[in-house]
Image (cartoon, rainbow, N blue to C red):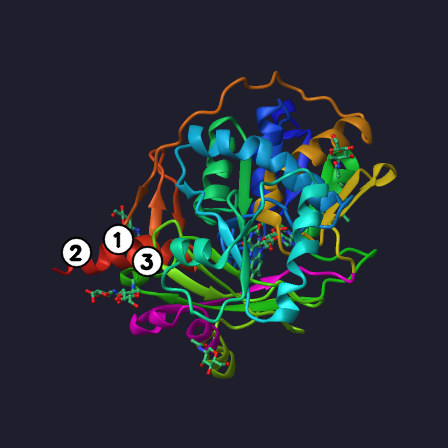
Amino acid sequence: MTTDQIYDVVIIGGGVVGCATLFHLINNGYNCIMLEKNKDLVAEASAGNSGMLHTGFDAPLGSLELHCIQQCQLHIFDILNKLDLPYNRIGATMVAWDSAQMSKLPKIMQHSRISNLSEINQLSLSELYQREPNLSRNATGAIHIPGETIVDPWLTPMVMAEHARIRGAKIYTRNIGSKIVINCSGLYGDIVEKIAGYSSFKIKPRKGQYLIFNKTAKDVISSSILPVPTEITKGVIVFKSVYDNVIIGPTAEETEDRHPSPTIDSVITKRLWNHGKKTVPSLLKHDIVHMYTGVRPATENKDYQIIARPDRNWLTVGGIRSTGLSGCIGIANHILSQVKDKFGIEPSKSSWETIQKVNFKFTKNGTVMFPYGIEHLITHPLTFTGVTRQMISQSNL
Ligand SMILES: Cc1cc2nc3c(=O)[nH]c(=O)nc-3n(C[C@H](O)[C@H](O)[C@H](O)COP(=O)(O)OP(=O)(O)OC[C@H]3O[C@@H](n4cnc5c(N)ncnc54)[C@H](O)[C@@H]3O)c2cc1C
Ligand SMILES: *[C@@H]1O[C@H](CO)[C@@H](O)[C@H](O)[C@H]1NC(C)=O
Ligand SMILES: *[C@@H]1O[C@H](CO)[C@@H](O)[C@H](O)[C@H]1NC(C)=O
Ligand SMILES: *[C@@H]1O[C@H](CO)[C@@H](O)[C@H](O)[C@H]1NC(C)=O
Ligand SMILES: *[C@@H]1O[C@H](CO)[C@@H](O)[C@H](O)[C@H]1NC(C)=O
Ligand SMILES: *[C@@H]1O[C@H](CO)[C@@H](O)[C@H](O)[C@H]1NC(C)=O
Ligand SMILES: *[C@@H]1O[C@H](CO)[C@@H](O)[C@H](O)[C@H]1NC(C)=O
């Protein structure tokens, strides 16, 4: 066996967490391989999210989740700029619709201020309607979180993976069984991270459904409109993609199925529609152009499950339920420090000082082409609807 077949790290799973980890470890000199069981990268939990880069204003204090989101906030904008990836710091407005919701706002602001992380401001009703003139007149109060940002949830991990490939990472899809992977890790002392379900926790899939509106609706909101969260859920958001589609979602339904059919539940569609009507009535004058669903890798634990098992050369990275995109680079950095500190593995190459732009082109057939002949199917409906549908309709003119 030649030395270039011995990797420092094996990463199982090519979702946003695996792709960001591959990107970060390669940049730090680790010789890595990423194994993905599907034909396409970013095709499971990471293909059904909202594409929001959260500031962590509502993440539990002291949690690993908050730590990773904070770390990600420190580095992700420089990375997005250097990779020339689209993002929009549109901010979020959390709106209370009655006095019970109103009474929760001070606690949310206080929580955010203790975490020291994001700017958060109370809005008077006149400030609210100045910012959001199409919002229903029934609001009783609001807070504004200017740092909440939207990104392309598919391009971001995908370009990170391709950036890693250009720097020598190996990415294998479809053809690898986990028996071989476990064996490889055992023989070569590599670190294997398993994303979905390991012995110490159980994945409890939680489904979310969305409605996507025509870009004609883009001016109905200027920031993401959040409800006041309940104990159970963060609630349904009215937000915008980086491609200017307005979206209502996600819902949160417990499900047994880790791979639910992409079919839409019409009862839930109705609920989303009513949420839109209550929040921004004029949105409903615009057409729904697409619907989609996603599944969160939730567990019985609220926090991330990142567990080092140095005796078995195994690092579990799981339960990245609802902020995997927002925390991606922070998670990758946490993994990097575990690889060094808990496993004592040093990079076999020198690290890279810079991040370089990766060129790519959207095609009319729903894929993205990279100049060295790699073509990826766009698996995220936000990216597909935002870019490809428009290209198809323009080419028909
Ligand atoms: C409705 C919804 C809304 C969300 N909104 C947001 C948001 O706005 N912002 C945010 O930050 N987060 C959001 N999230 C959460 C975010 O999408 C997840 O935290 C993130 O996708 C988790 O990424 P992952 O890489 O851990 O999992 P995945 O994307 O599921 O990736 C795991 C990969 O591992 C592969 N795999 C599994 N087993 C094996 C094996 N044995 N061998 C090889 N490969 C294997 C799978 O095929 C899969 O591709 C949302 C999630 C949902 C569902
Ligand atoms: C926030 O900052 C204050 C003062 O710098 C510090 O005492 C406190 O521990 C910080 N809180 C968190 C959650 O980091
Ligand atoms: C693991 O790899 C070794 C060496 O390649 C091989 O002899 C053995 O059969 C493999 N074990 C399993 C369980 O695949
Ligand atoms: C959005 O609306 C415009 C204008 O009414 C229309 O031309 C276009 O086809 C619609 N787009 C989609 C994807 O339905
Ligand atoms: C916002 O509301 C105004 C008046 O209520 C309406 O004329 C306008 O079309 C709405 N904007 C959008 C983008 O729907
Ligand atoms: C505003 O509240 C009133 C009274 O509760 C209700 O009748 C009306 O439908 C609400 N308007 C919207 C847009 O939800
Ligand atoms: C998609 O389109 C590109 C060019 O637009 C083409 O090179 C490629 O072969 C197409 N791929 C498929 C799967 O049709």
Image quadrant for the C terminus? bottom left
Q: In terms of depth relative to the viewer, which is nearer, 249 or 153?
A: 249
Is disc 1's CB within 8 Å of ligand 7?
Answer: yes
Residue range of the region highlighted in magenta in the rendering = 274-300
Which label is found at residue 364?
1
Which label is found at residue 114?
none
Identify the mark nearer the N-term, 1 or 2: 1
Side (left or right) of 330 relative to 384 = right
- Residue type for callout 2: Ser
Whether the magenta-drawn stretch holds residue 298 is answered as yes
Whether the magenta-drawn stretch holds residue 149 is answered as no
**Could you tell me how far apart the alpha carbons at marks 1 and 3 are, in whole angstroms?**
23 Å
Q: In terms of depth relative to the viewer, which is nearer, 75 or 350?
A: 75
Identify the mark nearer the N-term, 1 or 3: 3
In the image, residue 354 above or below residue 319: above
Q: Nearer the viewer, mark 1 or mark 3?
A: 3
Residue beneath the point at 34% across and 73% down: 284
Identify the mark nearer the N-term, 2 or 3: 3
The answer to whether the residue labelled 1 contacts the one labelled 2, judged by CB atoms less than 8 Å apart, is yes
Does the rendering let one see residue 41? no
- SS of the residue at dot 3? helix
View extreme (left): residue: 397
Q: 10 Å neighbourhood of mark 3: few (<14), some, or many (≥20)? A: some
- Residue type for callout 1: Lys
- In the rendering, at what x and y percent does residue 67 appear? 71, 39
Residue at the spot of label 3? 218
The answer to whether the residue labelled 2 contacts the one labelled 3, judged by CB atoms less than 8 Å apart, is no
Residue at the spot of label 2? 395
- Residue type for callout 3: Lys
Q: Nearer the viewer, mark 2 or mark 3?
A: 3
In the image, residue 62 above or below residue 203: above
